[in-house]
Image (spheres, rainbow, N blue to C red):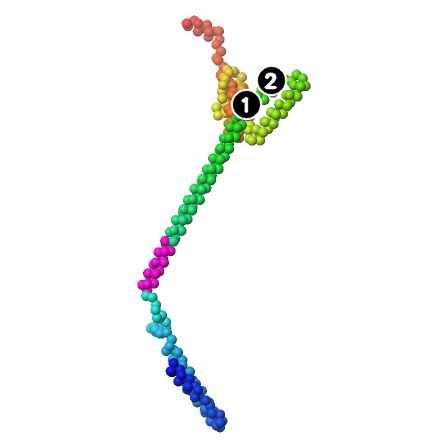
Amino acid sequence: MMGEENQLENLQDLTVDSSGSPEEIADQTMSTEADLNSEEFNLASQANDDSPTAASSENGTFTLEPDNAASESEYQAALEELSQEVESLRTQVDDRTNQYVRIAADFDNFRRRAQKEKEELEEKIKCSTITELLPVVDNFERARSHIKPQNDGEMNIHKSYQSVYKQLVDCLKRVGVSPMRSEGKDFDPNLHEAVMREATDEHPEGTVVEELVRGYMLGDRVLRHAMVKVAAAPDPVVTSEESDRGHGDS
């Protein structure tokens, strides 16, 4: 600080006396400029002395060295600690991601299973309800085939219950119920229940010759098997000669 005050005092002394001749004024001006340049140089030198310490290297470059720099080992230790924390966080993220994927897969499987069970339950209830209605349909069909109206009153009654029968059949069709057509087809144990066998040569053996109770389907599911009469092979015809030969052998 004392150096700066001395320099300021020196600057204050650098004045030019304008009372002299022009030559003297010019000489004083040149002398003053020289003194100013000298003072600027001194200030610059002092500023460089107050700046941070610079270390020179062999190739002529200068690097500033911080006064309180951490040692290299401390930096390495801090870096290692941060790396471990990052690795730990990455492991936690991977674990949480795997847990989320497993939970999402389990939930998706549960949702599908619940949906399938719901559909199966609805189908089971539908089948049970419709099966209870099939005997009603059978009674309508028997009445239609046996009752022959004889007068206008009976015809009106016949038309009334036939309209009810038609509404019932249309309702069953809308929910997917369809009757089996079994006569003339091969016997299928998945669709038919054979309650009678008839020896005949008019139909191939195993052919359904008569449908005694109609069967019904709900989509691809059997609601009720059809009760049918199945054709069997006719008994062999025994001629008189074979009969006489049989008696002779006895």
Looking at this view, is 197 or 219 the one in front? 219
Q: How many neighbours does mark 1 have within 10 angstroms: few (below 14), some (14-19), or many (20 or more)?
A: few
| Whether residue 74 is visible | yes
Determine whether 87 is above or below 214 in the image.
Answer: below
Q: Amino acid at mark 2?
A: His
The magenta stretch is 72-88
Q: Classify residue 18 as left or right of residue 142.
A: left
- Residue 135, which numbered label? 1
Q: Residue at x 48, y 9 (%)?
A: 238
Give the quadrant of the N terminus.
Answer: bottom left
Determine whether 12 is above or below 54 in the image.
Answer: below
The majority secondary structure of the magenta stretch comes to helix
Q: Amino acid at mark 1?
A: Pro
Give the quadrant of the C terminus.
Answer: top left
| Whether residue 41 is visible | no
Residue 154 spot, x, y in % from top left: 65, 19
Badge 2 is on which residue? 146
Q: Residue at x 46, y 42 (%)?
A: 108
